[in-house]
């Protein structure tokens, strides 16, 4: 799978070509770091933070060609001090988000019944009560019923604030409004589909958008994944094509995938390495994805074997082995499902780089010495829910003279290792 780097518009903060960013990091220090160059530059922040559920969240990970599943932990939604500790965590982060927002910017905060009322009070204090534009209800039909008392909980709440309501970006979105009978107004266009007659109206603050079900292609088995249709409405309404869209609790990456598809610039962050791995896979699977930086993605020591096969002016690269050096980064719950060395590989890619652009091997971490990797793959193979076969030999590659190849391998939990092969 070839990917061509195509930078977006120049960054407003520096005049340099913009490159999208995906960080495996606690979002608090990451946002402080961004503030040095991006203060007042982000037009849209969407966040789907923890909901103060008190739950432990896990994800299903598929291993190898067989796709056998194992459940691995992702994050704990428990907070020291209970609700007070949860709100303290959010307060620090919302302050940083407000600093990063442009004067025309907006923030959408996705919550449920547990914390929506308390977080609204917090956001009223930070942004001003007059900056609340909508309390959006996302209505869906999935979900459970109370065991004994109450109505079924079938909605989430999205709090939509504008930094400056007089200057905020707003692109009205349309939706179908179905009619119980045909009205006789000559100035209203009435259409019809399989559900009956309808007119187009401006979207209301109740979003009737189905939640994801298990058989949908966009589903990636990451907890609390939201549908692309939901994020598409938000991104289209509150950003332009030159806008920067950010999600600092990016989870499975839905906001970033939608921003990429709609041609927006974007920044994503999550403290879970598996979340960043899942997001990167979704981006890599897109056609004509732009180059993006991966910051602080977890790296590990694997002994990676490759062989090169010349075919005239072209070259094939074969992945011949991937074995841990020292401590195996995969837990026993995953290791016991591995029957062949390739089962531990979730994706691998081959890219050409000039000699000066070899990958770092010093294992540096943190924001001061962060690992930056601008994705410019020439060829990629990855396993998905629908397709478990991993190509172990690349397609024929036509490469520039000089330089070398960087072969990057990611295991099923997102741990990565890169090797450089001089040509």
Image: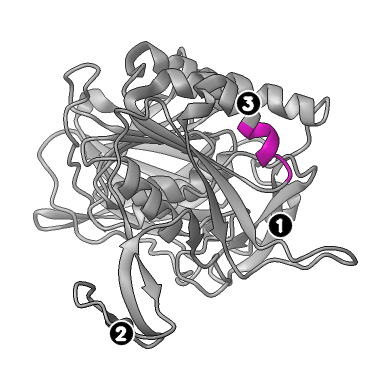
User: Is disc 2 placed on a helix, strand or loop?
Assistant: strand
Viewer can see residue 414: no
**Residue drawn where x is 26% and y is 26% of the image:** 357
Up/down of 400 relative to 131, above or below: below
Give percent across and percent down for residue 350.
30, 47
Q: Please say whether residue 185 is one of the residues in the magenta stretch.
A: no
For the residues labelled 2 and 3, the Cα–Cα distance comes to 44 Å
Q: Check the image and name the residue furthest to the right.
A: 148
For the residues labelled 1 and 3, the Cα–Cα distance comes to 35 Å
**Residue drawn where x is 11% and y is 41% of the image:** 400
Q: Check the image and name the residue furthest to the front.
A: 184
* Residue ID for mark 1: 71
Is disc 3 surrounded by few (<14), some (14 to 19) or many (20+) residues within 10 Å?
Answer: some
- Quadrant of the image occupied by residue 196: bottom left
* Residue ID for mark 3: 122
Is disc 1 surrounded by few (<14), some (14 to 19) or many (20+) residues within 10 Å?
Answer: few
Residue in front for this viewpoint, 185 or 159: 185
Chain-order first, disc 2 or disc 3: 3
Residue in front for this viewpoint, 349 or 13: 13
Is disc 2 surrounded by few (<14), some (14 to 19) or many (20+) residues within 10 Å?
Answer: few
Up/down of 416 relative to 17, above or below: below
Viewer can see residue 275: yes
Q: Quadrant of the N terminus?
A: bottom left
**Residue drawn where x is 39% and y is 45% of the image:** 256
Q: Which residues are magenta?
A: 114-120
* Secondary structure mainly formed by the magenta segment: helix
* Residue ID for mark 2: 192
């Amino acid at each position: 799978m070839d990917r061509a780097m195509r930078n977006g518009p120049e960054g407003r903060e520096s005049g340099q070509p913009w490159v999208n960013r995906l960080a495996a990091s606690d979002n608090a220090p990451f946002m402080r770091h961004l503030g040095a160059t991006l203060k007042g530059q982000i037009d849209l922040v969407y966040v789907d933070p923890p909901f103060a559920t008190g739950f432990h969240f896990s994800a299903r990970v598929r291993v190898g060609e067989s796709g056998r599943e194992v459940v691995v932990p992702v994050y704990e939604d428990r907070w020291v001090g209970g609700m007070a500790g949860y709100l303290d965590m959010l307060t620090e982060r919302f302050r940083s988000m407000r600093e990063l927002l442009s004067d025309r910017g907006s923030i959408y905060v996705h919550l449920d019944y547990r914390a929506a009322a308390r977080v609204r009070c917090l956001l009223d204090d930070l942004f001003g009560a007059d900056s609340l534009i909508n309390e959006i209800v996302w209505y869906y039909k999935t979900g459970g019923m109370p065991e004994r008392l109450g109505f079924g909980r079938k909605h989430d709440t999205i709090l939509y604030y504008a930094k400056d309501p007089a200057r905020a970006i707003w692109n009205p979105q349309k939706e179908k409004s179905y009619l119980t009978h045909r009205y006789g107004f000559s100035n209203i266009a009435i259409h019809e589909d399989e559900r009956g007659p309808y007119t187009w109206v401006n979207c209301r603050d109740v979003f009737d958008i189905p939640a994801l079900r298990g058989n949908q292609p966009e589903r990636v088995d990451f907890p609390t994944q939201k549908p692309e249709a939901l994020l598409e409405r938000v991104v289209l309404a509150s950003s332009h094509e030159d806008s920067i869209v950010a999600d600092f609790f990016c989870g499975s990456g839905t906001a970033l995938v939608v921003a990429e598809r709609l041609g927006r610039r974007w920044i994503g962050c999550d403290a879970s390495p598996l979340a960043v791995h899942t997001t990167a896979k979704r981006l890599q699977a897109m056609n004509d994805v732009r180059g993006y930086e991966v910051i602080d993605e977890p790296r590990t020591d694997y002994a990676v074997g490759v062989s090169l096969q010349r075919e005239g002016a072209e070259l094939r690269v074969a992945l011949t082995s991937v074995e841990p050096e020292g401590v195996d980064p995969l837990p026993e719950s995953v290791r016991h499902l591995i029957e062949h060395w390739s089962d531990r590989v979730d994706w691998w890619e081959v890219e050409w780089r000039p000699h000066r652009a070899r990958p770092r091997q010093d294992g540096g971490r943190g924001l001061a010495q962060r690992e930056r990797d601008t994705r410019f793959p020439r060829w990629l193979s990855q396993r998905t829910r629908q397709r478990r076969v991993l190509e172990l030999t690349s397609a024929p590659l036509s490469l520039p003279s000089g330089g070398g190849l960087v072969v990057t391998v990611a295991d099923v939990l997102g741990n990565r290792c890169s090797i450089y092969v001089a040509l």
